[in-house]
Amino acid sequence: MRDYWALLLAVIGAALFAVLATTPPGPRGVDAPVAEFSAERAMTDVQEIGGAPHPTGSVDNARVRTWAIERLRGLGLWVRTTVNPMSAKGAAGLVKWSGDATVRPVVNIIATLPGRDPAAPALVLMAHYDSVWGSPGAADDGAGVASILEIVRALKAGPQPLRDVIVLLTDGEELGLEGGRAFFRADPERARTGVIVNFETRGGGGRAAMFETGHDNGGMMRLFAGAVGHPSATSLSVLIYELLPNDTDYTPAKALGIPGFNFAFIGRSGLYHSPLATPANLDRGALQDMGAQGLDIARALATVSTLPQKAPNLVFFDAFSWFLVIYSPVVGWLVLGIAALLLAAAATRGKARWRDLIRGVVALLLLVVVAGAALYLVNLVSGADGKVNYYDRLAAIPRLQAQALLLCAAALSAVMALFHRASDGIGTRLGVALPLLLAGVAVQIMAPTAAFIIAWPVLLAGIAAATTAFAPRFGTSTTVAAAVVGVGYLGGFAFFLMQGVGPTMPFAAVVPLAASAILLWPLLPARRRLGWLGAAALLVVAIAIALWVRLDPIAPSVATYSLHHKVRIASPGGAFGPVQTPSR
């Protein structure tokens, strides 16, 4: 019975930590101090921007542009616009939306808040003010534009910045970064851009994360770690984003070697490019999260005497948003080395048998194979075996996350039934950890900024195992504490991972599952029948969710232009006529 209570305590504690890691802060009200970010103040701007769809070239796009210019002038900034020709690719995209082949220009808004030293490299705050066809764009990118306006207001409430702060509101981002490419191709301000902070979204809520930096981010990330009060950022996210075929307005700047930070929130994914992406549906906590982090780093960049120079990339991750853990990649070897020593000490003290070690290794490898196969196959059952509407899959992400969690739990329960025995010594426990230790070494060699997601759980497992071997009285409590912290962090990571790649690569969840398994294994009850029954029940529920997703009608939130039939969506003023949208 004691084992059940220990496991229950570990699971509940880990769940609470995971919720902490994935929940945005509450929005600050209009009565917040003038030098701080207030989501409620920013929402006034979101209401103006997100009142109606405003794609490039439309009447409402012009309305938003006129309003933004006056808003920036009202903040005391000097404002200009640049009119840029649209590329053939951008024009083709606009024709797909509107059916109108009229050539339309791309108009960027560029505003300057003067600093004390106009010769110093400038800080650029960037977002796009256009929306896609058929979506009000309250989040994408009304939230980004509103964040910048509130950040500028807060900066003006304090001492004058050392360097100029340039606000760049681009047009045509949704048509292929048209405005951003035009600015970084030829605008005179490009030459004096020292650093960029870009704001984006892919959804309507959730935690806002700093997910991309410039190359050689060491100096900039040390400034970020000291400046941002409640950060959400990992070097693994930066690496993953570099491997994905995704772009933002920061992409052309990064290609030029300009350092920067890219923020976005991706929760409530069904609202991405959705006709339901209205101000009323925007998560104000997400807006607060993005704006507060953006203000912290913008204030630091605007006031630092010399912008940090390029330095080798660092490893970093936030500790449940309390602070940023940051260190040189070489420290990863120290973490893995200490973990290896602790595991070896525990094996020696506990007189681990080779057959138990081998059984543990086989158990973890089988868990990875079984879970990966289940995640892939049941995802096919959910509808991924044929053509899907991308936006419909985004709307299904909460159910797909639950499906993945149940399948991971089912795989762990089944492997427990096969391999976990009451008579096991410490050998099986250490064997389960051994493949992760070796995987951590491999990742440390190939991608050192990503190795922390494996190295730290292995270290926690080593601490728990060594405590159990050398101080058995504290073994259970230490194991529970290690599981609470480690599985809690991994649960939050898995939540964001499934939001990002879950609809197409659900098997990616085997990484946090395997790392969690080495922490939970010592607490699992040695009950074979219970394990099989639990695995079967969890699998049935997961398949039921998959069938629900598959058979559910297409979500009302899907992007208008993604539907296969003709629609008519006209913004006020009748900017465009009938639309022939692409097939599903």
Image: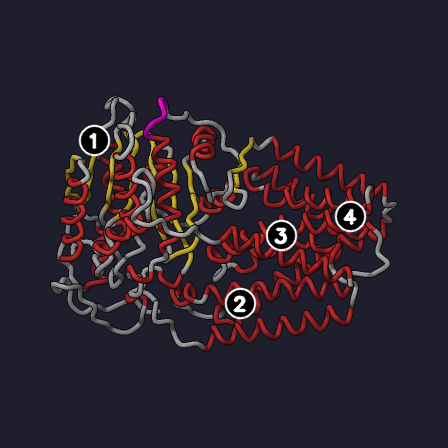
- Is there CB contact under 8 Å for labels 2 and 4? no
- Is there CB contact under 8 Å for labels 3 and 4? no
267 inside magenta stretch? no
Q: Earlier in the sequence, mark 1 or mark 3?
A: 1
- Element class at badge 3: helix
Q: Nearer the viewer, mark 3 or mark 4?
A: 4
Q: Amino acid at mark 4?
A: Gly
| Residue picked out by circle 3 | 487
Alpha carbon separation for disc pair 4 and 1: 64 Å
Q: Earlier in the sequence, mark 2 or mark 1?
A: 1
| Residue picked out by circle 2 | 379
- Is there CB contact under 8 Å for labels 2 and 3? no
Alpha carbon separation for disc pair 2 and 4: 39 Å
Could you say where residue 211 lies in the image, as x and y percent from the top left?
44, 44
Q: Earlier in the sequence, mark 4 or mark 1?
A: 1
The residue under the point 32% across, 46% down is: 38
- Element class at badge 2: helix
